[in-house]
Amino acid sequence: MKNKISMMQLFSLNIFIIISSFFGIGIYNVFKSAKTDAWISIINTTILSFIIFFLIIYIANYKKNLTIGEKVIHLYGKKMGTIINVLLILFVASTSISLIFNLGHFIVTQFLSETPVIAIEIIFSIAIIYINIKGLETISRTSLILFFISLIFVIFSILGLLPNIEINNYKPILEFGYKKTINGGIRIFLLNFVPLFLTLIIPKNQIKNKEKYNKYTLLSYLLGCIIILIITLVTLGNLGINLTKLYQYPEYIVLKRIEIFNFIDRIENLISMQWIFGLFIIISFCVYNINTLIKPNNKSKLLPIIILFAITLTTNLLFKNITIFNYYTYYIAPIIRICFLILIIIIALSIKIKKILKS
């Protein structure tokens, strides 16, 4: 019998999925799209996120003992179900390659400028393989521990940066009209919230206190929205739109302004660990998703190694530099997410039709 995970562990996974995709990727997209009105885009995203919430709740409540891959096979049969699962794997892989490049590029550009990105990716790959071999329970427990540590860092960051906020940095409001904020909101919705479907790999019956599933899932979405809204407001309020657009990781650069403990040198390096924690957990969870979609209940140590090797190799072949990566996240990734969202909607509709035919 599978080991169960707690609702708080699932809660932490949801939060990490939302905020980890925002770091370096979502924030670049939203400021490029909406500029000084980026914070309004986040509010728009909060409204859109209810689409994801209702879809996930609906699919999770169907055949509660099955993973999303097994549900697909049950709905469409072996042949068609396998094709759809391959499409799901490709989506998770596309998410993984962007996250692992983001992780490696951030560490190299901000901490280890003389170190090849591939070296960083290999080091983290060893830890990701280890945690995947241990299984979902270890991933979820690690996620919960790192969530509380990250939450402390987030609170500390906000308190340290609030005194430096300049209200004029939020002006002018709606300079380019509300259309830009809708564009930014849709992008964040696609990049940060559509990947929440990763949690459907966990059968609802495998979660303790599953009667609280709806409540905790909704709370995680709202908290995730609040966190990325605060990150956006604090970053813009401290740097202004020109500096924010100049940097790939403005949310890290702004941490340099924290002056609570002047006797600690480069405190931003410690606080920025929250982003590294999040990226590590979600990449690990992506590998778990692919592993489970390929072979449910697989306990082989080889498959996670092969998966991560393929992801790392693809990442380095596709993203030769940050310009290519930014082009991918701004123009190509949203299209992939739209296709995936359509696929999830089709699965939800298939469940609805199957229920109607049975009644």
Image (tube, rainbow, N blue to C red):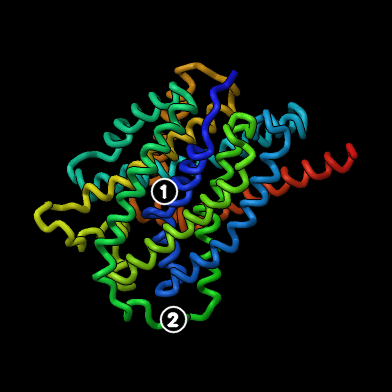
Rendering coords of residue 209 (x, y %): 59, 35
The residue positioned 56% from the left and 46% from the top of the image is 216
Of the residues under marks 2 and 1, which one precedes in the sequence? 1
Q: Amino acid at mark 1?
A: Ser
Q: Which mark is residue 173?
A: 2
**On the rendered structure, is 166 left or right of 10?**
left
Q: Which mark is residue 20?
A: 1
Task: Looking at this view, name the residue that lies furthest to the left.
Answer: 263
**Camera-side residue: 64 or 45?**
64
**On the rendered structure, is 222 left or right of 25?**
right
The residue positioned 33% from the left and 33% from the top of the image is 124
Q: Secondary structure at mark 2?
A: loop
**Camera-side residue: 40 or 259?**
259
Task: Indicate the quadrant containing the N terminus: top left, top right, bottom left or bottom right.
Answer: top right
Characterize the local packing of mark 1: few (<14), some (14-19) or many (20 or more) Cα atoms within 10 angstroms: many
Residue 319 visible in the picture: yes
